[in-house]
Image (tube, coloured by chain):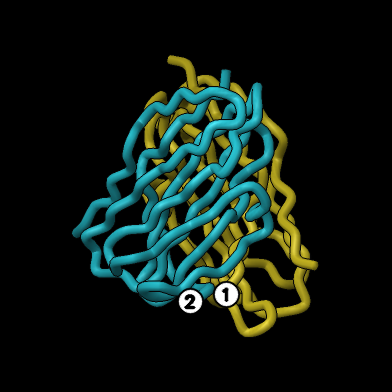
Amino acid sequence: GDSVTQTKGPVTLSEGTSLTVNCSYETKQYPTLFWYVQYPGEGPQLLFKVPKANEKGSNRGFEATYDKGTTSFHLQKASVQESDSAVYYCVLGDREGGSAKLIFGEGTKLTVSS
Amino acid sequence: GGIITQTPKFLIGQEGQKLTLKCQQNFNHDTMYWYRQDSGKGLRLIYYSITENDLQKGDLSEGYDASREKKSSFSLTVTSAQKNEMAVFLCASSSTGSSAETLYFGSGTRLTVL
């Protein structure tokens, strides 16, 4: 079945350093890939999504490329800020048995210190 | 814009007790979801509903019931709370339930069972 594997946290970085959160997926279909972010005390919210292979998504300085060849969707940011401290989820949106199915990765907790 | 409201924010119950969590959305979305969030395990789908009075089981439905009596509301019942059960329950909605759509989440209900 479908699966998503992402960097196991927690990840701790200093402000101004670069971030990569790895995400790999397995599916036989043509999914939409998402990154969601969850700040403390809130529910997850969409960071961005990419519906097609070989396209890039971006928002707030974060970006990821939907790479069908390597089945990866790694999240990157060149320079993190303290306000980026949150849990990041890689998500695969697919169809199974005629119904939509979302597979969440386990989440990667990022803490950025000043 | 819209909002998802979950009540209560914190729920403390006794072992064996039946407990109900409520969710309201004003997006006018067709599809609503209940997810369970455990530390280090990502989000797991309990129930979802694609329209009023519809119910579909997710991967984690055992021990739970759900009810969608109105388009705007979706309730989840823990049928017999288990001791030491601690998790955050997240309600979400999306427009039609497509696998490429954005999910909008509430801020969660944190359950503790004594």
Residue B111 left/right relative to B92: right
Q: Quadrant of the N terminus of chain A?
A: bottom right
Residue B62, visible in the rendered structure:
yes
Q: Residue at x 46, y 28 (%)?
A: A85
The x and y percentages for residue A91 are 59, 57
On screen, A113 above or below B35?
A: above
Residue type for callout 2: Ser
Colour used to depict chain B in the structure image: cyan
Residue type for callout 1: Ala
Q: Quadrant of the C terminus of chain A?
A: top left
Instruction: Determine contact: label 2, label 1, CB under 8 Å.
Output: yes
Q: Which residue is mark 1?
A: A100
Residue A88 numbered tag: none
Q: Residue at x 61, y 64 (%)?
A: B57
- Chain represented in yellow: A
Toward the viewer: A91 or B29?
A: B29
